[in-house]
Amino acid sequence: MEIIKRTRKRYLVTIESKIHTIVIVVIAYDDEDMSRILRNQYGRLLVDDNGNRIAQVTFTVTELGKYVAKGDSD
């Protein structure tokens, strides 16, 4: 049995465009996971129909508690 310790992080994300500014909180394991969540949930705010970036994304990170996953090692 393999024990995997993963630490989740709280990302305070600011999405700024010419029209408006949105501040959201994303809980993710790493920067890549946070980026995936942003693209899936807020992609229409980040790029226009032509694929051009229309918003600037900034974030700060806070580490949360540890999550322990137990699984079989194959």
Image (cartoon, rainbow, N blue to C red):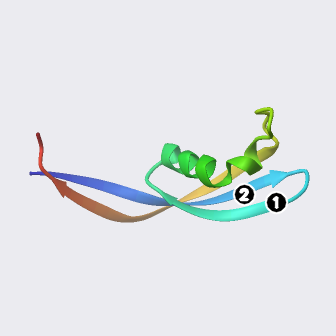
At label 2, counting other C-alpha atoms closer than 10 Å, the crowd grade (few under 14, some 14-19, many 20 or more) is: some
Query: Residue beneath label 1, please?
Result: 21
Q: Residue at x 75, y 54 (%)?
A: 15
Residues at badges 2 and 1 in contact (C-beta under 8 Å)?
A: yes
Query: Residue beneath label 2, please?
Result: 14
Vertical placement of residue 47 versus 37, above or below: above
Counting residues from the N terminus, which is met first, the one under dot 2 or under dot 1?
A: 2
What SS does tag 1 mark? strand
Q: Viewed as shown, does residue 6 lie left or right of 44?
A: left
- How much space separates mark 2 and mark 1, taking CA atoms? 7 Å
Kind of residue indicated by mark 2: Thr
Q: Residue at x 72, y 57 (%)?
A: 14
Q: Nearer the viewer, residue 60 or 13?
A: 13
Q: Residue at x 86, y 59 (%)?
A: 20
Q: Viewed as shown, does residue 61 lie left or right of 1?
A: right
Q: Viewed as shown, does residue 64 lie left or right of 14?
A: left
Q: Viewed as shown, does residue 59 lie left or right of 66?
A: right
Question: In this figure, what is the number of numbered marks?
Answer: 2
Kind of residue indicated by mark 1: Thr
